[in-house]
């Protein structure tokens, strides 16, 4: 039998089975079937089209050894099978379908803009950027107006095609100003952001070196409802003369948490910031914090924890109600330690659970990010978790020791015990191919990272 498009209603098992078997052969062997390189626009003194947000000024130091604690954001993003980046040939942003190998244009004009971050999640692409032209503002020096531009990303079918997944539509959704006063493109200002299909949240930390004490640091969290789709672009209306009526659909600020609110919830960072990232779900904001006994640098804590400390604080989007707190410190000594709540099987979670019990799997944002210290003193820089396929790719580092490994549960449709999960290491060269920015993404089909030369690497299995 065939459906309305003429395609078979049942899978073509003669094609699917050998393809999947081949994939898991390479996954279990920690070997790439194919490596693809993508040349992206590089950062030079003459082209500052991408200026990532500076991470906190802190790093790991043990004796004479120094290691990065948190990398800068990558210049690309990925969700499911769609990779978005600025290609070198056209200098425009494109969306690359890793399955079909087709590329689609992203309608973002970046010639007069400096991109700070891009993120694809919940089928919405958000590009955070600022104007190239700056203006002077008091003691902060040169500041730039910052904006977030959102696009809907949808699969669609070309006319006359029998393949329902053969093309993508990327359409402008809305735009909003991130901060009314503008921000410097320096270490005087740092911001973390996240979004879902309905909300966008921004944590802002800004330092004024003309002041002293807590008054020198401005902090706030702002939450927008971004469900409303609007053609209005504040970046093209500097005087606000054409701002739409508040009753019209548009991104709207629904909550601001100022310093007093952040202090109340115990998440104010001050001059010893530990915030690693912020996350969202339908009702809460989650602040993930992190501290380490070997941290050094301007933003490191003068009283370090015993080992590696991670935490998660959840606060309601409305600001009304109790907050959630979860924390963990790697147990053991400085030589070796294993977090009892972490590990590859824990990161897979359990898709069959529901309610409160499901919240405690390894992917719930309200749980402290124990995956970072699951094999202390190794630090897990990044991982790829495909819970449905029960596959995990893990990148760990301990100063000059590096390990990129694959974990594949040996049973089909049955959870294995932790000690049954095989770990197989990739060759050392794969670290250079994928961990140039300390970030990997993907699933059981491919892993995407950035090499040390600044090119995107797609490892296919």
Image: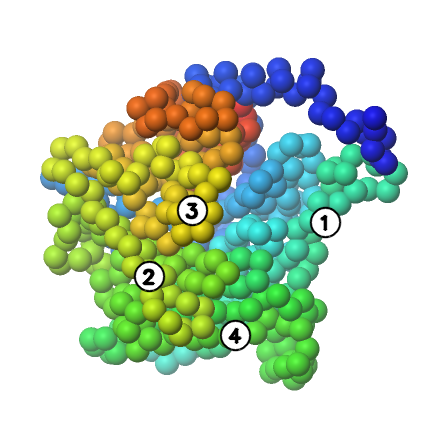
Point out the tag, 4 or 1, that comes first from the N-terminus.
Answer: 1
Point out the tag, 3 or 4, that comes first from the N-terminus.
Answer: 4
Nearest to the observer: residue 342 or residue 229: 342
Nearer to us of marks 4 and 1 is: 4
The reply to whether callout 3 and callout 1 are in contact (CB within 8 Å) is: no
Q: Which residue is mark 2?
A: 324
Nearer to us of marks 4 and 2 is: 2
Point out the tag, 4 or 2, that comes first from the N-terminus.
Answer: 4
x 51%, y 75%: residue:
254
Q: Which residue is mark 3?
A: 358
| Image position of 169 (left or right of 210) | right
x 42%, y 39%: residue:
349
Q: Using the rendered view, name the quadrant where residue 383 is placed.
A: top left
Point out the tag, 3 or 2, that comes first from the N-terminus.
Answer: 2
Dot 2 falls on a residue whose secondary structure is strand
Spatial CA span between label 4 and label 1: 28 Å
Point out the tag, 3 or 1, that comes first from the N-terminus.
Answer: 1
Location of residue 44 with respect to 235 vertically, above or below = above
Dot 3 falls on a residue whose secondary structure is helix
The reply to whether callout 4 and callout 1 are in contact (CB within 8 Å) is: no
Residue 253's disc number: 4
Location of residue 210 with respect to 316 vertically, above or below = below
Which quadrant, please, contains the N terminus?
A: top right
Position of residue 284 measured from the top left corner of the image (x, y, whole percent): 43, 63
Q: Which residue is mark 1?
A: 169
Please, which residue is most extreme toward the right here?
Answer: 160
x 79%, y 42%: residue:
157
| Residue 293 visible in image | yes
Q: Residues within 10 Å of mark 2 (few under 14, many from 20)?
A: some
Spatial CA span between label 3 and label 1: 34 Å
């Amino acid at each position: 039998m065939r459906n309305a498009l003429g395609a078979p209603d049942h899978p073509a098992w003669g094609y699917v089975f050998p393809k999947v078997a081949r994939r898991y052969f390479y996954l279990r062997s920690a070997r790439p079937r194919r490596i693809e390189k993508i040349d992206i626009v590089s950062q030079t003194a003459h082209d500052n089209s991408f200026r990532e947000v500076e991470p906190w000024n802190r790093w790991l130091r043990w004796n004479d050894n120094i290691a990065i604690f948190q990398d800068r954001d990558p210049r690309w993003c990925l969700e499911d099978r769609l990779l978005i980046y600025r290609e070198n040939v056209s200098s425009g942003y494109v969306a690359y379908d890793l399955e079909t190998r087709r590329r689609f244009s992203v309608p973002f004009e970046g010639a007069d803009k400096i991109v700070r971050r891009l993120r694809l999640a919940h089928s919405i692409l958000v590009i955070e950027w600022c104007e190239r032209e700056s203006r002077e503002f008091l003691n902060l020096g040169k500041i730039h107006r910052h904006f977030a531009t959102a696009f809907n990303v949808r699969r669609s079918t070309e006319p006359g095609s029998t393949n329902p997944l053969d093309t993508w539509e990327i359409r402008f959704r809305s735009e909003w100003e991130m901060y009314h006063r503008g921000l410097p493109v320096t270490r005087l200002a740092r911001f973390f952001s996240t979004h879902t299909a309905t909300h966008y949240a921004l944590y802002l930390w800004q330092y004024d070196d003309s002041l002293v004490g807590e008054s020198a640091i401005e902090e706030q969290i702002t939450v927008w409802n971004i469900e409303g789709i609007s053609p209005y672009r504040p970046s093209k209306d500097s005087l606000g003369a054409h701002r739409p009526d508040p009753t019209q659909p548009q991104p709207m600020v629904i909550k601001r948490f100022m310093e007093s609110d952040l202090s109340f919830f115990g998440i104010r960072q001050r001059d010893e910031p530990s915030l690693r990232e912020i996350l969202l779900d339908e009702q809460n904001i989650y602040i993930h914090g992190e501290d380490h006994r070997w941290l050094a640098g301007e933003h490191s804590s003068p009283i370090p924890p015993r080992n590696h400390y991670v935490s998660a604080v959840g606060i309601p989007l409305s600001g009304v109600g109790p907050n959630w707190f979860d924390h963990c410190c790697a147990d053991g000594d400085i030589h070796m330690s294993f977090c009892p709540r972490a590990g590859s099987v824990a990161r897979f979670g359990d898709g069959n659970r529901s309610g409160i019990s499901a919240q405690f799997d390894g992917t719930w944002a309200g749980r402290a990010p124990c995956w970072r210290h699951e094999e202390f003193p190794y630090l897990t820089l990044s991982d790829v978790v495909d819970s449905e396929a029960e596959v995990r790719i893990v990148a760990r580092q301990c100063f000059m020791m590096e390990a990129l490994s694959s974990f594949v549960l040996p049973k089909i449709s049955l959870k294995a015990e932790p000690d049954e999960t095989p770990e197989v290491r990739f060759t050392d060269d794969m670290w250079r191919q994928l961990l140039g920015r300390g970030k990997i993404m993907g699933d059981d089909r491919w892993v995407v990272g950035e090499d040390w030369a600044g090119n995107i690497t797609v490892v296919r299995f």
